[in-house]
Amino acid sequence: MSATYIRDLIRRDKERAEVEPFNRLKTELTHAFAAPEASYQPLTAAEMIARNRA
């Protein structure tokens, strides 16, 4: 394998690793903004952190 090919594989893997979390966040936000307002619950910062750690 050539060094150029390996560098290209590394670059593509890095790009994919950066894009996937962004796409997950975008999907989560799309669902959140589409939810009816009545489904929202007030949370403190501590509750939000605890929920996201679970």
Image (cartoon, rainbow, N blue to C red):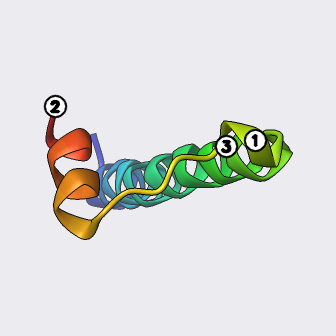
Residue at the image position 39 percent from the left and 61 percent from the top = 11
- Residue 21: image location, x then y, percent: 44, 51
The reply to whether the C-beta atoms of the residues labelled 2 and 1 are less than 8 Å apart is: no
The total of numbered circles placed on residues is 3
- Residue 10: image location, x then y, percent: 31, 54
Compared with 46, 30 (above or below) is above
Q: Amino acid at mark 1?
A: Ala
User: Horizontally, is 10 left or right of 24 in the view?
Assistant: left
Residue at the image position 15 percent from the left and 46 percent from the top = 50
User: Horizontally, is 47 left or right of 34 in the view?
Assistant: left
Question: Which one is closest to the eye, mark 3 or mark 1?
Answer: 1
First along the sequence among labels 2 and 1: 1
- Residue 6: image location, x then y, percent: 29, 50
First along the sequence among labels 3 and 2: 3
User: Which residue in the structure is indicated by mark 3?
Assistant: 27
Q: Amino acid at mark 2?
A: Ala
Within 10 Å of the Cα at label 2, are there few (<14), some (14-19), or many (20+) other Cα atoms?
A: few
Q: Amino acid at mark 3?
A: Thr
User: Which residue in the structure is indicated by mark 2?
Assistant: 54
The reply to whether the C-beta atoms of the residues labelled 3 and 1 are less than 8 Å apart is: no
SS at circle 3: helix
SS at circle 2: loop
Quadrant the N terminus occupies: top left
Q: Residue furthest bottom?
A: 45
Q: Nearer the viewer, residue 47 or 1?
A: 47
Within 10 Å of the Cα at label 1, are there few (<14), some (14-19), or many (20+) other Cα atoms?
A: few
User: Which residue in the structure is indicated by mark 1?
Assistant: 38
